Image: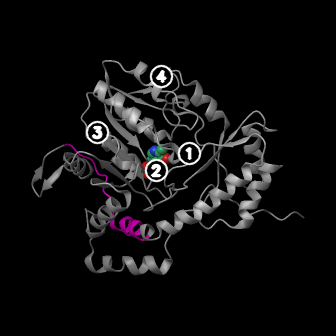
């Protein structure tokens, strides 16, 4: 009888040693201070500023709320338009719509990021912002986006959920645009179980984000604005602090796997990589493109992976604009994005991936 294969999932959350975490959370049993911008919340904000190379950062309960609040902090008029892309996780589009704004979908380039040559045609007198995505850590054309934003006086809010730790021209990626949003979800390169952060260029934003994430409370009997609750708790903050201690090692191990993948796919006809080479890459994802020269379609390849208990993912298919909740509402031309979305497949990457697991993935590709 054939032995049942072990599952290989798309990723495996990085965790500190059990004893290390237990030791680190002990002080909480003395203080009984579990949330509300505690000591570890403040420490993680400080350490993340350092690691990400940014001056201003607000820690949040997750990446999605960080995105919603980053947008909300600008107080755009309801019904205003935000130019974004559909080749992303659904959160990007939801955050715009849940703010009462209208997403205007711009097409993407071959690397999955927004095509800046198509942005200006989409600008109307209702446009207030551009919300591009550094997909897979591929950096958007930040200079060109900045140039356009200046001409039309638009804000730029990056979804940098995939871009943890990435640098551009020696500067943290979170220093570009007006604001950037990171996710520390369990499936991301760096995690605090759930978590996220907004980085921003204007200091006034710290105050607004603080109010937004804490009900607008500024004193025992004082509420100054209409906020929600998006605070990170101390257990998450401690998880973040410990994972941050090990992040260089985590990324180094991922880097070795991604390099091995690059080598392996260069020998497979019809499979291409769409990873850009950044100055520093976090190796969070390894997306491939299945071209017509490959012997199967993307979906056939996906099915074969599944039959072999390998849980590759179609990041990002369908496009957000094509999901049930959006498909009959927005009708922008996103031909390139749709084409890419039909061909892309993201392979498993995690820090303690074994040679055996790696070989199983590559064997399927080579078949
Ligand atoms: C993960 C992710 C988010 C949302 O982050 P959460 O922490 O899961 O809320 C937003 N945008 C993109 C592109 C993501 O990958």
Q: What residue is pinned by disc 3?
A: 72
Q: Residues within 10 Å of mark 2 (few under 14, many from 20)?
A: many
- Left or right, 144 with respect to 108, comes to left
Where does residue 210 sit, x and y in percent of width and height?
23, 52
Q: What residue is pinned by disc 2?
A: 163
Residue 310 quadrant = bottom right
Is the C-beta separation of discs 4 and 3 under 8 Å?
Answer: no
Is the C-beta separation of discs 2 and 1 under 8 Å?
Answer: no
- Left or right, 266 with respect to 136, comes to right
What's the distance in space between the residues labelled 2 and 4, CA to CA?
28 Å
Residue range in magenta is 226-242
Q: Residue furthest right?
A: 1
Where does residue 224 sit, x and y in percent of width and height?
13, 46
Is the C-beta separation of discs 1 and 4 under 8 Å?
Answer: no
Residue 23 in sight in this render: yes
Q: What residue is pinned by disc 1?
A: 276
Q: Viewer-nearest of labels 2 and 1?
A: 1
Q: Is residue 210 above or below residue 28?
A: above
Secondary structure at badge 4 equals loop
Nearest the eye: 175 or 198 = 175
């Amino acid at each position: 009888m054939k032995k049942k294969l072990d599952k290989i999932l798309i990723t495996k959350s990085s965790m500190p040693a059990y004893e290390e975490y237990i030791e680190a959370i002990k002080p909480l049993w003395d203080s009984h201070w579990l949330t509300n911008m505690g000591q570890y919340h403040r420490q993680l904000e400080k350490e993340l500023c350092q690691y990400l190379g940014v001056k201003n950062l607000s820690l949040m309960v997750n990446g999605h709320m960080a995105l919603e609040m980053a947008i909300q902090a600008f107080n755009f008029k309801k019904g205003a338009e935000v130019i974004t892309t559909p080749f992303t996780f659904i959160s990007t589009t939801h955050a715009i719509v849940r703010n009462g704004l209208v997403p205007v979908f711009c097409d993407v380039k071959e690397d999955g990021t927004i095509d800046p040559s198509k942005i200006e045609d989409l600008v109307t007198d209702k446009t207030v912002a551009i919300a591009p995505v550094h997909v897979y850590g591929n950096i958007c054309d930040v200079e060109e986006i900045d140039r356009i934003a200046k001409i039309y006086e638009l804000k730029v809010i990056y979804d940098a959920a995939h871009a943890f730790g990435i640098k551009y021209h020696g500067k943290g990626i979170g220093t570009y645009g007006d604001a950037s949003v990171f996710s520390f979800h369990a499936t991301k390169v760096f995690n605090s179980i759930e978590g996220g952060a907004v980085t921003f260029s204007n200091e006034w934003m710290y105050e607004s984000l603080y109010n937004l994430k804490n009900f607008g409370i500024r004193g025992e009997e004082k509420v100054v604005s209409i906020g929600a609750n998006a605070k990170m708790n101390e257990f998450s903050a401690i998880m973040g602090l410990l994972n941050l201690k090990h992040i260089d090692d985590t990324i180094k191990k991922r880097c070795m796997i991604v390099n091995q993948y690059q080598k392996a796919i260069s020998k497979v006809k019809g499979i291409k990589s769409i990873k850009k080479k950044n100055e520093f890459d976090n190796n969070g994802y390894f997306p491939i493109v299945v071209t017509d020269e490959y012997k199967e379609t993307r979906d056939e390849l996906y099915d074969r992976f599944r039959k072999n208990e390998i849980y590759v993912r179609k990041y990002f298919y369908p496009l957000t604009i094509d999901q049930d909740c959006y498909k009959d509402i927005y009708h922008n031309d996103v031909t390139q994005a749709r084409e890419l979305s039909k061909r892309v497949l993201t392979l498993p990457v995690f820090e303690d991936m074994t040679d055996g697991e790696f070989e199983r993935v590559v064997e399927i590709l080579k078949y």
